[in-house]
Amino acid sequence: MQRMNAESQPSTRRLILVPAVITLAVTLLRLVGEVNHWAGAWFTTDMGASVVGIVWLAPAFGVYFALQLSASGKAPNAAWRALAFAALGIAVAIIMTRGFTIGAIAPRLHLSYTFHTRLLYGWSVMGVAAVATLPGWPALFQTLLAYAYAARVPVAIIMFFAYHGHWGTHYDAVPPDFPARMSLASTWLWMAFFPQLVFWVGFTVVSGMLFGSVAVALVSFLRSLAPLLARRSD
């Protein structure tokens, strides 16, 4: 087992290297754009989504990783199985989040809807959702997990300096119910470290697994049609 893991690690590193570099470049571009107050439509400084951002890269690289793994002989045992477990991850995230939002889950767990509870629950939901996709395609899961950390660790580091220096970017933004008088260390842990390395890693895995599985299922379907099309052309 150790030998197999050692042999697979370099392959994963090579596969995520270019995507990780591209993601870091986009991260730095967004940082520079926000610090210099470039076009607000492209570089938002609040906690909302921005046109320039790495969140959009997760599904795109999910497709890339899926096609590369399939071409190298690491395709899922069945495309439909990978797609089913990816859909399960999405369903888990939606149902558990919706249930908490409308107040159907918190009372049963004896939880109050506070700032810290909301964050802890959100991280847990995305973690569970990501793990739910694992049985469908372990090789893609492993690759996306490695890429997710390569993408999100630099963001967590940037956010520490942003909170310390009060840069006025989305990297040091806080929600309206953010507790007052929280120390720099606590702020970074609650708003950067755990969100980036748990929630956003989970999001990257779930979205990448979904789009990657869809891509492979589509390719498999088109290949199954090829013989039929060839017969009709004859």
Image (cartoon, rainbow, N blue to C red):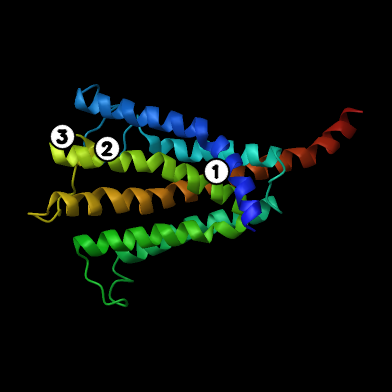
Q: Which residue is mark 2?
A: 158
Q: Amino acid at mark 3?
A: Gly
**Residue at 27% over, 48% down:** 192
Q: Vertically, is 69 above or below 29?
A: below
Q: Vertically, is 86 above or below 50?
A: below
Q: Which image quarter is the C terminus in?
A: top right
**Residue at 57% over, 35% down:** 14
Q: Amino acid at mark 1?
A: Phe
Give how far apart the Cα atoms at labels 3 and 2 are.
13 Å
Q: Amino acid at mark 2?
A: Ile
* Lower position in the chain sequence, tag 3 or tag 2: 2
Query: Label 3: how many residues lie within 10 Å, few (<14), some (14-19) or many (20+)?
Result: some
Give how far apart the Cα atoms at labels 2 and 1 are.
28 Å
Q: Is residue 176 left or right of residue 23?
A: left
Give how far apart the Cα atoms at labels 1 and 3 are.
34 Å
The residue lying toward the viewer, choosing from 227 and 39, is 39
Query: Label 2: how many residues lie within 10 Å, few (<14), some (14-19) or many (20+)?
Result: some
Q: Write down the quadrant of residue 35 in the picture.
A: top left
Q: Is residue 14 left or right of residue 189?
A: right
Between tags 2 and 1, which lies in front?
A: 2
- The answer to whether the residue labelled 2 contacts the one labelled 1, judged by CB atoms less than 8 Å apart, is no
Query: Label 1: how many residues lie within 10 Å, few (<14), some (14-19) or many (20+)?
Result: many
The residue lying toward the viewer, choosing from 204 and 190, is 190
In percent of width and height, residue 211 lies at 55, 43
Between tags 3 and 2, which lies in front?
A: 2
Q: Write down the quadrant of residue 53 in the picture.
A: top left
Q: Which residue is mark 3?
A: 168
**Residue at 29% over, 71% down:** 106
**Under tag 3, what secondary structure?**
loop
Q: Which residue is mark 1?
A: 211
* Lower position in the chain sequence, tag 2 or tag 1: 2
Between tags 1 and 3, which lies in front?
A: 3
